[in-house]
Image (cartoon, coloured by chain):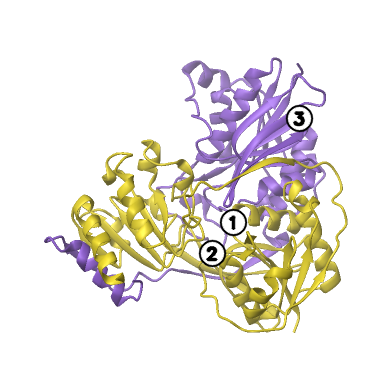
Chain colours: A purple, B yellow
Amino acid sequence: MSALRIVVCVKQVPDTWSEKRLDPLDQTLDRAAADGVIDELDTYAVEEALRIEEANEGSTVVVLTMGPAGAADTVRKALSMGADEAVHVVDDALHGSDALATSLVLAKAIERTGFDLVVLGSESTDARMGVVPAMLAERLGVPQATLASKVEVDASTSPATVKIHRQTDVGQVVVSAQLPAVISVLEKINEPRYPSFKGIMAAKTKPTATWALTDLDIDASSVGLAASATVVVDAVARPPRGEHTIIKDEGDGGSRIADFLVSRKLL
Amino acid sequence: MADVLVLVEHVDGVVGKPTLELLTLATRIGSPVAIVVGDGTGLAEKLGEYGATAVLSADDDALTSSVVAPVVSLIESLVASRSPAAVLIASTTEGKEIAGRLAVRLDAGVLTDAVDVALDGDTVVVEQSVFGGSTVVHAKATRGVPIVTVRPNSVTPVASPAAADVSAVTFPAADGRHAVVESRSATAAGGRPGLSEASVVVAGGRGVGTAEKFALIEELADALSAAVGASRAATDAGWYPHAAQVGQTGVTVAPQLYIACGISGAIQHRAGMQTSKTIVAINKDAEAPIFELADFGVVGDLHVVVPQLIAEIAKRKS
């Protein structure tokens, strides 16, 4: 049985129920306009990391985030759930970073802190690109065992292995890989624990490293909005939907829907 | 015209509809070249019918025995040899992973969940729908070949016959260690189309009431050859599998027709379906926010309205 160093990546995202808009100056998400919370999909990753830690004595869970100073709240949430230490990459030059730059920064931070396993949510609920876990595997040069609805780690072998149920649009495959590896987990793979009072208190004294780009030997010109490999040309609010009809069911509701479908050539 | 590489999705010798959509978009910006993982010979006729000028067939077990990385190596080598104007991939979970890794390999811009693609001069510009559909953006890659994933149902496939010659291609073995596929199981969708690519989605929510009553939702879905979706309230209650959850933490759908049954339309749910072309809602509560999105809404009991609708569909089809 070997101890594992597990890095779990978390992202602070705008609260689902808050208004989201693009900053008119640079077409990036106006994060100041929305309340920031830990991404719900990342809480499944934190929980899965903690379960792997608990099953493998002596293991450590490191929570990693990249984001503005306010993202420290998100780090603390993961620490209060039980993660052991944290790394927060914060640098003004990171503003507007695209997925390529984000994966570069995360990969450098993961390499610096050291890892046997990287755990992420399958996508973020704000950008919803779903590319960063695969990009990290590519950058770290390790197996990609992503989109997991079930994870089993076997640390009794050397090297340790991970087996997952990979759920894609076309079905499920069982995938195995040797560690070190990157895994991503799907919504509802587990039931994330609530932080205990003890956990919340303990989170305040857990080691948290704050790294800037210079700590990761990353040139500021390779990240941020100016280095993005994509650019938004324009953005407009979607026009409201056209005319719509709402009726009260007078015993003919189903029939009226059928009429409507016929009128739209959908039936 | 420059090539546009299109990664083909196919199951049991049938080209997937999202691939025909990709070919249709590709004809607008260049000369579509279809990449087939597997033997492309039997698919060439269909691919040519929708505009493929060439079919590159990569029949190598290595492409399917490891996760994502070998397909990335294949496309990477084809980008190097053909200098395409763009690479188009269906916006499935795996398609987006392929696109992401390819973008790292090529240090190129990746644009996911596009709903349209056009040329502005020589530049490929994509249209995307962000923030759960509330904002429409146009975006482009600023370096490298644009790698674009296109959301299923964004465009109607249009036949554009071309002579698609099939040629076998080889690719360099992917370096490094990869996750290995040990076994696969077919989808348990009961013959229904996949949720993210279905043209019609029928979804049930809290108003359905029990797991057993989801049979009614399935019956309506089958009458319309639709996929079945569910709101988070329904999946959290254990009435329907989580894989069917439509919403911010689940699947995003944009079908031609979305029928919401007993779904109130919380923002969490709307984020996953509000770019659907036509939305029909059935809900007891006249104040339910789903009616703000609905093109046609019925305030009533779904357990009464849906059976009548199923009967009417059967009647009008016969």
Callout 2 touching callout 1 (CB < 8 Å): yes
Q: Tell me the quarter of the picture where residue A210 sits.
A: top right
Q: Secondary structure at mark 2?
A: loop
Residue at horizontal 73 percent and vertical 23 percent from the top = A4
Task: From the viewer's side, name the closer residue of B290 and B26.
Answer: B26
Residue at horizontal 36 percent and vertical 51 percent from the top = B218
Do discs 3 and 1 share a chain? no
What chain letter is assigned to the residue under label 2? B
Question: Which quadrant of the rendered structure holds the C terminus of chain B?
Answer: bottom left
Q: Would you say residue A67 is visible in this rendering?
A: no
Residue at horizontal 23 percent and vertical 55 percent from the top = B307
Task: From the viewer's side, name the closer residue of A200 and B168.
Answer: B168
Residue A166 vs residue B105: left or right? left
* Residue identified by numbered label 3: A116
Residue A35 vs residue B79: left or right? left
Do discs 2 and 1 share a chain? yes
- On screen, A15 above or below B221? above
For badge 2, the amino acid type reads: Pro
Question: Which quadrant of the rendered structure holds the N terminus of chain B?
Answer: bottom right
* Residue identified by numbered label 1: B92
Residue B300, percent across and down? 18, 55
Q: Secondary structure at mark 1?
A: loop
Task: From the viewer's side, name the closer residue of A66 and A141.
Answer: A141
Q: Secondary structure at mark 3?
A: loop
Residue at horizontal 25 percent and vertical 68 percent from the top = B315
Q: Residues within 10 Å of mark 3 (few under 14, many from 20)?
A: some
Q: CA distance from mark 2 to mark 3?
A: 36 Å
* Residue identified by numbered label 2: B152
